Image (tube, coloured by chain):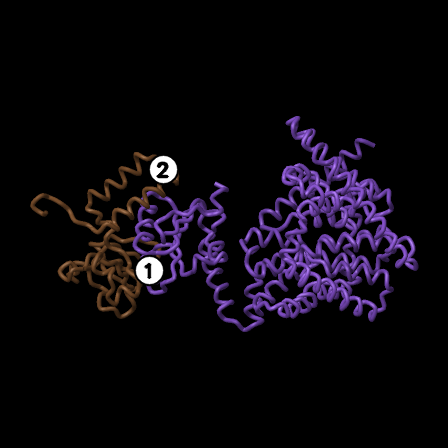
Chain colours: A brown, B purple
Amino acid sequence: MNAAGAEVFPEGLESSLAFAGQLLILLDLPPSRVEARLNRIRAMSHTPLRAFFHDSDAMHGDGEMLDYPEQMRTLVIDEGHFAIGRTVPELNLTGQGVELIDVRRGAARYACRATCWMTGFVLAMCWC
Amino acid sequence: MEHSLILCLLSVLLVVTPAVALCRRFGLSSVLGYLAGGVFLGPSLLGWLPANADLRRLAELGVVLLMFTIGLAFSLPRLLAAKRLVLGIGGAQVVVTTLAFLIAGMWLGLAPTPAFIVVGALAMSSTALVLKFLGENCELTAPHGRIASGVLLFQDVATVPLLVVVSILADDPARLGIELGWALVKTALVFTGLVIVGRRLLPPLLNWVAATRSLELFMLSALLLALSAAGVSSLAGLAPTLGAFMAGMLLGETPFRRQIEADIRPFRDLMLGLFFLTIGARLDVSVFGHAAAGVLLVLFAAVVVKALLVMPLIRAFGHSRAEAWRAGIALAQGGEFGLLLVSSGMSLNLLDADVAQPVLGGLILSMALAPLLLRFDARIAGWLLRDERLQASCDVEAHIADHGAAFDRHVIVCGLGRVGQNLLEILDQEGIPGLALDLDPERVRQVVAAGRPVFLGNAAQPGVLRAAGVERARWVSIYRYSRVARGGATTRR
């Protein structure tokens, strides 16, 4: 299959897209724009849809984990956290299979790479 | 003369329009706007409203049309189907409240006739305020909503004989028994006459009018029917409201019911507005100073005592304590029919100003307080019952409402599973505001930390959806059986 260039993805992802597309149409968005949005996600092998916050049961091992191994988690940097004062590359998150998606503090968003972490930062991460 | 009439109408509209607009803005019934407008325009404050009888007669036409539309909506089969709620709880509420207040009134030294009017007024709650609030908050089908609307239906119908009794009391109270019997005979005669004429003549007549396809002619005919029934009743020496009610009942059985109701409604609302305006104008605001104790007593009776009397009655009919308290609190206010009884009593010189004014003041205050009590009835019931779950459900709603107030023309995503989250993400990318509700505390905590507008709350509860701004939402998305459900409020798009 790989040799043929085929891509395998859980069927739920495509139904998610269909559902979202239908809602966007109902919200009076032009069909061409909706189609373009959905195709963009398909072209990215559904990556934006693959990682999500699993429910608390799934975190302890559930069927959902098999179909969708990537999951989102948030981490709040409290006072005294070992990450304070370190930069992203210093922590080598990628090496541990964790991808940093978003860094925010209150309403402000920070660039994921060039940030030196401080108390109150909230990190949204994805890992498998 | 005409000049002064135009100026009078102008002053009425100048005061009433902003008052009603303010009420609409804060989600209050327009009844309160008219009452407040009347108080301002009345002789005790601005004095812009002429105190002639013409205006009052025109206003009473509003009550006649109100009774006509109540008759239209009144259906005997529906009444019998809900007899436990309407006849059972409703009947018990009116009888028990009336008796309890009558004993208290006599003990306070009121003469029988004024006591009867005051007590009748106190027993009534506000159909206009309560049904509007329950309807707007999707609570009409909730147990407490069904109990409250059943009781209100009974009260509406009970007003008809009460008004008849008041008009008899004005003639000769000593002959009440004979007069009441005579009135019953006349009522039966008028009703029989109306039934015969109504059944035979009305359907072909209305069919002919409908066939002309002239909306104007249909509207005129509907008005003619309502007023001629009131006229017949008045000529027979009965209250015009009674005839209007009976004519409404007869027309309620015809297929034209909805059309007639829609045609009469604008006239009714305007005239009824005028009626509430004249009642507001009757209130002497100085009563809040020199007879404050009386006003507070009436307020206490209409709000606290009435709720305390209703609650055990509802319990006795097998409802839970929470339902009984919530329905009791929903009914804890004076109403338009109470104001009507007091105003009729004043017009017929049955009530002295020193009794009528505190009653009017207390009833109007209780109606002003009602939206607050209705809004927080679950919280109050939870507090009274020490039921933390009931209270907590209100805290959840308050939290969602605080944050949800910023959302407008948004999409409410019910359930934050994989599809819900994907939907929220795509909506965000398209710049469409989305708000999600979920029941998993840990997941909600995680997603909120990521900066998403997600709230812990059960989307199956009307209060939670309301707090999430379902009235302002464009769509509600429920992903359970792979469907997008159209929210009730989307019709307002």
Q: Which amino acid type is shown beneath numbered disc 1?
A: Ala
Residue assigned mark 2 = A29
Residue B488 percent across, percent down from the top left: 48, 47
The answer to whether B142 is drawn above or below residue A46 in the figure is: below
Q: Residue at x 36, y 52 (%)?
A: B481
Residue B486 percent across, percent down from the top left: 43, 46
> Which secondary structure lies at badge 2?
loop
Q: Residues within 10 Å of mark 2 (few under 14, many from 20)?
A: some
Residue assigned mark 1 = B449
Q: Is residue B168 left or right of residue B125?
A: right
Q: Which amino acid type is shown beneath numbered disc 2?
A: Leu
Q: Is residue B126 left or right of residue B441?
A: right
> Which secondary structure lies at badge 1?
helix
Query: Callout 2: residue from which chain?
Result: A
Q: Residue furthest left?
A: A3
Residue B17 percent across, percent down from the top left: 66, 41
Looking at the image, which is closer to me, A70 or A68?
Answer: A68
Residue B370 percent across, percent down from the top left: 64, 58
Labelled pair 1, 2 in contact (Cβ < 8 Å): no
Q: Residue at x 86, y 58 (%)?
A: B352
Quadrant of the image for the C terminus of chain A?
bottom left
Number of numbered tags placed on the structure image = 2
Query: Callout 1: residue from which chain?
Result: B
In the picture, the disc for residue B145 is: none
The residues bearing labels 1 and 2 have C-alpha atoms spaced at a distance of: 30 Å
Q: Residues within 10 Å of mark 1 (few under 14, many from 20)?
A: many
